[in-house]
Image: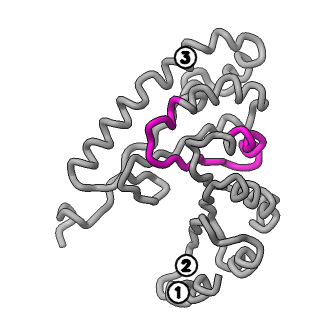
Amino acid sequence: MHPTTPGRYLVGYSDLHPSLDCVAAWRGIPALCLDLATAPDKLEPLLERSVRDFHRIFDHFDRLLKARGLPSVTWLGIPSLGKLHIPSCDVAAMISTRHFARCSLPLLRREVAGMTRNIYHVDGKGVARHLDLLLAMPDIHAVQWVQGLGLDQPILQWVPLLRRIQAAGKSIVVDLQLDELEGFIAAVEPEGVFLCLGVEAGQEPEVIKRLEQW
C-alpha cells in the first residue's frame, strides 16, 4: 500500500499549549516565576493572549480531520469521534496551588469548554499537588498520570493517587512496565483505566490473556 493511501494512518492535530505553559515559553520560566511572585497582575494580558485564539486554532485542525473522516487524535494516541483535547500545564510543578488557581484554572475552564472529552496531562508529583482542583472540574473526564523516573518508580507507590482519581469519577491513562502488570492489576480496579504497555513483537497475545483475568 502506498504511504498516501487513505486509511493507512491516523493523523492527529498539533500539540497545543495555551495558558501558563505558553506564557512560560514567551517569558522564560525564571522570569515567569518572578512575575507570579512580584507582579501577577502584569501577567494578565499575556495570559489572555495565550488562550484568546485557542478554540479558533483547535477548530481549524479539527475541521481538517473531520473533512477526511478522521477521528480527533493527539500525541497520546487515543482516538475520539468527537473533539478530544489533552490540556496540560507542566510549569504548574513549579508554582503554588494559590498561583495555579489564580493564573491557570480560569484559562483551563475556557480551554476545555465545548470539548467532547478532555484528558488532563499530569506530569509528575509536582503537578499532582493541584490534583484536587483538577478533579473538581466536570469538564476534565480523565487524567493521564506520568509518574516520572528514578525514585518516582515503581508505579505501585502511586496507587493511592490513582484511587483518588477513580473515586472522583475520572478515568485514568497510565504507563506501566510489563513486570508491574500483575501488581497493578491486584491493586487497582479496572473500570476506566487505559493502560499503555510497551511489549515486544509477538508478546501481545500473552499479555492480553493476562489482562483478561482483571
x, y (%) of residue 9? 29, 63
Q: x, y (%) of residue 120?
A: 59, 46
Looking at marks 3 and 1 on the same chain, the residue that comes earlier in the sequence is marked by 3
Q: Residue at x 77, y 17 (%)?
A: 37
Tell me which residue sits at (58%, 45%) in the image. 140
Closer-to-camera residue (152/143) = 143
Q: Circle 1 sits in a helix, a strand or a loop, which is it?
A: loop
Look at the image and say whether residue 108 sits in the magenta stretch.
Answer: no
Question: What residue is disc 2 on?
Answer: 199
Boundaries of the magenta span: 110-133
Q: Which residue is mark 1?
A: 203
Question: 33 left or right of 206?
Answer: right
Do tag 2 and tag 1 residues touch (Cβ < 8 Å)? yes
Q: Is residue 156 above or below residue 108?
A: below
Residue type for callout 3: Leu
Counting other residues with Cα less than 10 Å from the Cα at mark 3, is it few (<14), some (14-19), or many (20 or more)? some
State the CA–CA distance, disc 2 to disc 1. 6 Å
Q: Residues within 10 Å of mark 2 (few under 14, many from 20)?
A: few
Q: Is residue 46 above or below residue 185?
A: above
Rendered-image quadrant of the C terminus: bottom right
Inspect this view and state whether residue 31 appears. Answer: yes
How far apart in space, not on screen, are marks 3 and 1 (Cα)? 49 Å
For label 3, the residue is 46
